[in-house]
Image (tube, grey):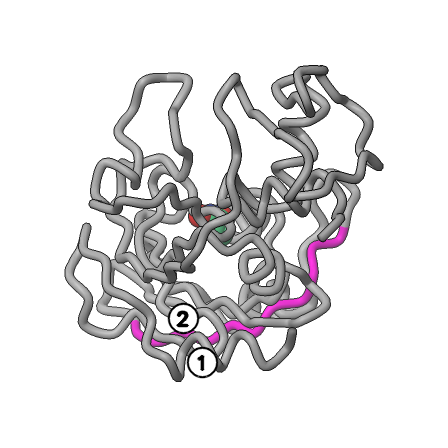
């Protein structure tokens, strides 16, 4: 079957389609021995030999879907340029996996891992509107006025952030816990939203993507998605 080079690489489990485009543009990919940087290149999985960083890319024979409770202090990348620990130090897998979307180094909670590029594309694409729910622990009391500003969409560097569903869960006299639900994820979006109202997040944890909850999964542990959970995401495909 012929397909665009980024789709082929992503189907091989290299990374999401968008990330594969960056890898192609960086000159790391060759087709039949020639470096290719043209994003509209089409390859035939049966005839063409595609390599990334000199390693041949092959379509997987089976797909893997995992959920992880990412601990704080791990980077969501296959190899961190600063030499920090990555979430892949926590996974044992015979197949090469990549993360579906990202969490910041200091954020913990639910992250999905797979070798299925179409699946990753589906879960992260804003078109499919899979909500992401975070619990932000913030020093001091977050007042109703602050929540109203967050709901409307704060303006950061002249750009209005998407609207968010926010709710104060508790305030114990020192710390507020706020549920924040967004369906697009711009870089550091939740932290930037709170910075815009003058609040610093002490701990940020993602507890849900769409209907899939973190549940009781221990920090640093992974477990396979159930057939129902996979089917839930794929019904949008
Ligand atoms: N928003 C953030 O600020 N950080 C994350 O890790 C995820 C969403």
Q: Residue at x 72, y 67 (%)?
A: 127
Q: What distance separates the C-alpha of mark 1 from that of mark 2?
A: 7 Å
Secondary structure predominantly adopted by residues drawn in magenta: strand
Residue 9 location (% of width, % of height): 60, 40
Return the x and y of residue 60 as percentages of the image width and height. Answer: 46, 50
Left or right for 56, reference 168 = right
Q: Quadrant of residue 5?
A: top right
Q: Is residue 104 magenta?
A: no
Which of 92 and 52 lies nearest the eye of the viewer? 52
Tell me where the magenta segment starts and ends, as one range: 160-170
Residues 162 and 208: in front is 208
* Residue 165 included in the magenta stretch of the image: yes
Report which residue position mark 2 lands on. 208
What residue is drawn where x is 67% and y is 47%?
Answer: 7
In this rendering, does residue 199 appear at all?
Answer: no
Q: Position of residue 34 (x, y in %)?
A: 72, 15
Disc marking residue 235: none
Residue at coordinates 67% horizontally, 67% vertically from top-left?
A: 163
Pointers 1 and 2 in contact (C-beta within 8 Å): yes
Check disc 1 and report the residue beneath it: 211
Q: Is residue 147 above or below residue 77?
A: below
């Amino acid at each position: 079957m012929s397909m665009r080079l980024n789709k082929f690489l992503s189907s091989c489990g290299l990374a999401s389609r968008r990330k594969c485009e960056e890898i192609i543009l960086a000159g790391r990919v060759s087709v039949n021995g020639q470096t290719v940087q043209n994003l509209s290149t089409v390859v035939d999985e049966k005839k063409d030999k595609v390599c990334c960083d000199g390693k041949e890319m092959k379509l997987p024979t089976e797909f893997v879907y995992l959920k992880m409770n990412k601990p704080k202090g791990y980077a969501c990348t296959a190899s961190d340029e600063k030499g920090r620990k990555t979430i892949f130090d926590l996974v044992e897998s015979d197949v090469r996996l990549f993360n579906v979307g990202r969490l910041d180094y200091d954020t913990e909670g639910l992250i999905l891992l797979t070798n299925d590029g179409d699946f990753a594309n589906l879960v992260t694409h804003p078109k499919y509107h899979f909500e992401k729910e975070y619990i932000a622990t913030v020093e001091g009391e977050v007042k109703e006025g602050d929540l109203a500003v967050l709901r409307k969409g704060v303006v950061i560097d002249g750009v209005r952030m998407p609207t968010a569903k926010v709710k104060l869960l508790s305030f114990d006299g020192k710390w507020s816990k706020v549920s924040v639900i967004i369906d697009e994820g711009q870089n550091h979006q939740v932290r930037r939203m709170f910075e815009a109202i003058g609040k610093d997040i002490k701990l940020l944890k993602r507890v849900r993507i769409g209907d899939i909850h973190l549940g009781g999964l221990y920090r640093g542990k992974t477990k396979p998605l159930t057939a129902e959970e996979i089917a839930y995401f794929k019904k949008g495909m």
